[in-house]
Image: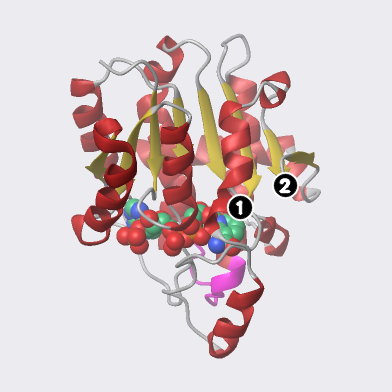
Amino acid sequence: MADRVCLVTGGNSGIGFELCRGMATAGFHVVMVSRGTKKGQPALEKLQAEFGDSVEMMLCDMSDLENISKLYAQYSAKFDRLDILFNNAGAMWGKRQFTAQGHEMTFGVNHLGYFEMTRQFLPLLKSTKDSRIINTASVAHRMADLRLDNLNHENKWYNQWRTYGNSKLCNILFTRELARRLEGTDIITHCFHPGVVRTRFGSGASGVVWLFWPIFRMLMINARRGASTGLHLALSDDAATSNGEFWASKKRRKGSRHARNDDNAVQLWEKSEAMVNV
Ligand SMILES: NC(=O)c1ccc[n+]([C@@H]2O[C@H](COP(=O)([O-])OP(=O)(O)OC[C@H]3O[C@@H](n4cnc5c(N)ncnc54)[C@H](OP(=O)(O)O)[C@@H]3O)[C@@H](O)[C@H]2O)c1
């Protein structure tokens, strides 16, 4: 049985891949969660070439919440602890799509995916001493126009950036309320903006901005730098001195006014709970 175990969603690509690499370097056994084997297997082989069997892969397409319970069953059959959970899998969708449970895809994967992963793994995180839950959010939350009475963007013109920004605001509100609910436990949770990072992010998006994407990409930071704040939150003593905060460049940030609204954080939690319990 591994000494310390870390699970990274979206671990086969971009920031998640570098989170896996950083955690394996720090001596953790890493479970790299991938949506499927096609993109997962090559990433696993790369990590195993560096770290051997201390990295393994489990599969979970988070556009169906039932897959998260299946992942939990597979994980808990093998491990009796979870030290670090990285909720990181996410994307922006160019056209309105829906998850298996009928939620708008961006909200469903980027927020409800984090929510349900955490809910499923929480007993294991609670029984593991000094565990942490680290969520990849984004400065894009500043583009949000979150309507708590219309989280699935029903009957609304679909704007991919706005919808993505909403999901990233949800990540920050979720982290805030999670920390409040974890008071009295020794679990630390934070979220972070990784920077503007050269990854596969945006490959499913649409619109004229993508014509200029190759130029933007040259200005972006690499994925290793993008993962550095997440690794700081998982590994540093600094991150253990507070809870539920939004970080960027390894520093605490305020985030937008909406990201600090505790009433909205509570409401989002209650609505999310109702949605995953259906
Ligand atoms: N890149 C940036 O500048 C930036 C800035 C701020 C925040 N972020 C956030 O960083 C996180 C990681 O993104 P990235 O930039 O590293 O992009 P990426 O290279 O596209 O990685 C995204 C990961 O999420 C996975 N994923 C997407 N939909 C999924 C689903 N339905 N089920 C399971 N996994 C799914 C992808 O799987 P596949 O490989 O199968 O597609 C991939 O492993 C996201 O939460 C994103 O919002 C990125």
The magenta region covers 151-162
Q: Mark yes or no: residue 266 visible.
A: no
Task: Tell me the quarter of the image containing the C terminus.
Answer: top left
| Coordinates of residue 144 in the picture (x, y in percent) | 67, 61
In magenta segment, residue 156: yes
From the image, give the main secondary structure of the stretch colored magenta.
loop
| Coordinates of residue 131 in the picture (x, y in percent) | 50, 19
Q: Which residue is drawn at 43% across and 42% down?
A: 21
Question: 10 Å neighbourhood of mark 1: few (<14), some, or many (≥20)?
Answer: some
Q: Residue at x 48, y 66 (%)?
A: 201
Q: What residue type is labelled 2?
A: Ser
State left or right for residue 246 relative to residue 34. Answer: right
Q: Give the Cα separation between the discs numbered 1 and 2.
A: 9 Å
Mark 2 residue CB less than 8 A from any atom of ligand 1:
no
Task: Tell me the quarter of the image containing the N terminus.
Answer: top left
Q: Of the numbered discs in the image, which one, if any, rests on residue 225?
A: 1
Task: Say whether disc 1 or disc 2 marks the residue closer to the N-terminus.
Answer: 1
| Coordinates of residue 13 in the picture (x, y in percent) | 40, 57
In magenta segment, residue 87: no
* Residue indicated by mark 2: 249
